[in-house]
Image (cartoon, rainbow, N blue to C red):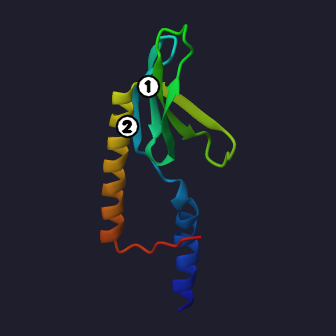
Amino acid sequence: MGKIIIFLTVFLAPSLCFAGSISTYKVSFKTLACDGTQGLASIDADRLMKIETVKCDPNDALKEVWQVLVTGEPGSKLTYRVFSTTKEEAEKVQKEIDNYQGVKKKSLEKSDRLIINK
């Protein structure tokens, strides 16, 4: 019995400590700013916070863009990273994240893993 407790303490405890920070699924998309500049970005699928429309200034090249708002560094509660993109790209990002979340949910439901909610 003592060997089982030591095994659980040594091997299971470290994996539980890091279980909340394991997310490696990235979503890439094209960015577009009000001034017309374009680029590429990737975000962690588990960190998407908000997608909303932003009105650009009347003298900007574009009249409106969509923002993908994600959290910054893990553990930072006041820092956000903001990316602007087109409506179509924002919809693609949301669809890809919805698909990922669905697969992740099914995987957890079919798993025999023990999930501890803090």
The percent coordinates of residue 82 (x first, y second) are 56, 31
Residue under circle 1? 85
Residue under circle 2? 93
Q: Secondary structure at mark 2?
A: helix
* Quadrant where the image shows the C terminus: bottom right
Taking depth in this image into account, of 48 and 76 the one nearest to the observer is 48
Asked if the residue under mark 2 is in contact with the one under mark 1, i.e. CB atoms within 8 Å, the reply is yes
Q: Residue at x 40, y 72 (%)?
A: 113
- As displayed, is residue 98 above or below residue 8? above
- As displayed, is residue 8 above or below residue 83? below
Q: Quadrant of residue 17?
A: bottom right
> Which of the two discs, 1 and 2, labels the residue nearer the N terminus?
1
The percent coordinates of residue 9 (x first, y second) are 58, 76
Q: Residue at x 53, y 78 (%)?
A: 8
Mark 1 → mark 2, Cα distance in angstroms: 10 Å
Q: Secondary structure at mark 1?
A: strand
